[in-house]
């Protein structure tokens, strides 16, 4: 079975812009609360994680 054209296009785009998949083990309760908070704030979880990571990197670079 071959991947459909959209899947192939998405994979090519993600590789081009440097998007990777990461896996972390976190407590279920925290993950569920985070998902709910993101939904309430109308932001994607990926966007919020990216923002928090950038903020943390910036803080650490100031030290």
Image: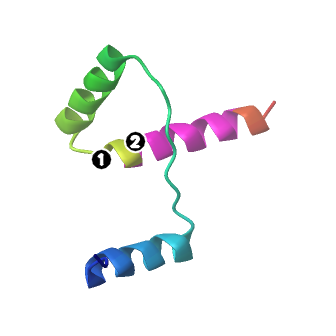
Give the extent of the magenta segment: 47-59
Answer with left or right where residue 25 lies relative to residue 7. Answer: right
Is 54 a magenta residue?
yes
Answer with left or right where residue 58 lies relative to residue 1. Answer: right
- State the residue in front, 45 or 24: 24
Image coordinates for residue 4, horizontal then vertical, percent: 26, 80
Q: Tags 2 and 1 in contact by the CB under 8 Å rule?
A: yes
Q: Residue at x 27, y 36 (%)?
A: 38
Q: Residue at x 21, y 28 (%)?
A: 36
Q: Quadrant of residue 16?
A: bottom right
Magenta segment's dominant SS is helix
| In the rendered image, the vertical position of residue 28 relative to residue 41, given as above or below | above
The residue wearing badge 2 is 48
Measured Cα–Cα span from mark 2 to mark 1: 6 Å
Q: Residue at x 37, y 79 (%)?
A: 8
Answer with left or right where residue 56 lies relative to residue 37. Answer: right
Is 1 a magenta residue?
no
Image coordinates for residue 22, horizontal then vertical, percent: 52, 45
Q: Residues within 10 Å of mark 2 (few under 14, many from 20)?
A: some
- State the residue in front, 59 or 8: 8
The residue wearing badge 1 is 44
């Amino acid at each position: 079975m071959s991947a459909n054209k959209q899947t192939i296009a998405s994979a090519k785009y993600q590789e081009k812009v440097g998007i990777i998949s990461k896996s972390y083990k976190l407590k279920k309760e925290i993950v569920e609360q985070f998902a709910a908070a993101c939904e309430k704030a109308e932001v994607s979880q990926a966007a919020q994680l990216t923002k928090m990571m950038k903020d943390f990197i910036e803080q650490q670079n100031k030290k």
